[in-house]
Amino acid sequence: MKDLSLANVLIAKRRERGITQDELAVHVGVSKGSVSKWENGNSLPDIALLPIIASYFDISIDQLMSYSPQLSKGEIVKIYMKLAQGFAHRAFDEVLEECEGVIRKYYSCFELVKSMALLYLNHAPMGKAPEHLYERAIKLCEHILQHAQKPFILQEATALLALSHLGLGQADKVIELLCDEDGMPLQYGMGTNSSAVSQAHQMLGNMDKATEVEQIEVYYGLMSMFSGLLSYLQLSISDYETAKVIFDKAYALSREFNMRWLFANHVAGLYTLGARMHQKAGAVDETLDCLEKLVNLCVHEFFPVAVRGDEFFSRIDRMINQSEEKDFIPRDEATVKEHMLNDLLLDPAFEGLRGNERYDKLVDKMKKFVEGEL
């Protein structure tokens, strides 16, 4: 197979200088035929000649060889896809040898090394000795953790390292990497990490703890999805048709998961945005329906403000206790109630509803609640 990397550079640089193959050969101290073979990609210069050639063209040896120790994300993706397709259509050992060649060439490009660890993880079950690929992925991840500095790649390498140990059935190492002293994930919302921790606990026979991990992960995922829907609704509030679809999906989600109890503050935000959405569209009855839901939620279900579980989320006590210890929950109910009245029902967006009997009753009910008369 011809090596055209150096060949292309030589041709381009020689033409840029306006010199012949003979002139380059004389400077380097070789025959014109040698230069011709280099430019045809049929051979490479002796390693001792590389500094002479690079110096002559005033470039580095890496530039001469078209080599950079770091690759762009696009280049890494192309390499990954080429090798992944190779595993699907070529001899496994042949592709594995090619992978190792790429790793050796770009060992200091941690993004590339990480992608190779992922490639090995994804294809380990296909090989004759999956243990070898898991072990090789472990070595690659450990190399990243020892030498890389960027937090995001260290985090990703840790996750891949845990999955590699999981593939080898080393559940205790997964717990050691990803969990606190109680065997619970250091982070939630990452999906893969929590799943790996759950599987590790299952391997160890800790089914209760695995259930707890899964419930907390779903809890955080639900909260994140609902918050995302609220942000999307806020963004789309002037586009009634789009906003209504978002609102309906968020409302259905809130009903399915009893979110009036679990996340009363989030649901209050949904009703408020829904009311503003309908009011902008001139849908008075729908606006009042949302405001009525908001008032009833505030009066009957909002307090005490706390992280809560229910029959579905029955194993999240540890998370609840940690949240209370960190004091994430607002304690001043009077301030919260005042906010409900002033920033929600007395919002200028609802100015046009004043004098509407149904709206005025809702405001009156809210005032009585804030003043402690309900």
Image: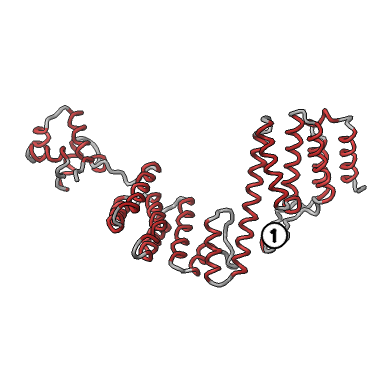
The residue most toward the right is 373
Identified at 67% across, 43% down, the residue is 249
Total number of numbered labels?
1
Note whether 73 is above or below 307 in the view shown: above
Say how the picture is coloured.
Answer: secondary structure
Image coordinates of residue 247 in percent, x first then y, are: 69, 39
Which residue is drawn at the image coordinates 10% and 32% (left, top)? 23
Closer-to-camera residue (138/325) = 138
Badge 1: how crowded within 10 Å, few (<14), some, or many (20+)? few
Asked if residue 30 is positioned above or below residue 331 in the image, the reply reads: above
| Of residues 9 and 308, the one drawn nearer to the viewer in this rendering | 308
Q: Where is residue 164 in the image (x, y as percent from the top left)?
A: 44, 62
Q: What element carries label 1?
A: loop
Residue 161 coordinates in the image, percent (x, y): 45, 60
Judging by the rendered image, the residue that carries numbered circle 1 is 312
Would you say 367 lies left or right of 76 here?
right
Extreme-bottom residue of the structure: 205
Residue 29: horizontal and vertical position, in percent?
A: 8, 40
Q: Quadrant of residue 138?
A: bottom left
In the image: residue 260, left or right of residue 65: right
Q: Farthest residue in the front direction?
A: 89
Residue 95: image quadrant is: bottom left
Please tell me which residue is depicted at 50% across the width and 63% down the height of the picture. Answer: 177
Q: Is residue 196 left or right of residue 321?
A: left
The kind of residue on which mark 1 rests is Phe
For image coordinates 53% across by 58% down, the residue present is 193
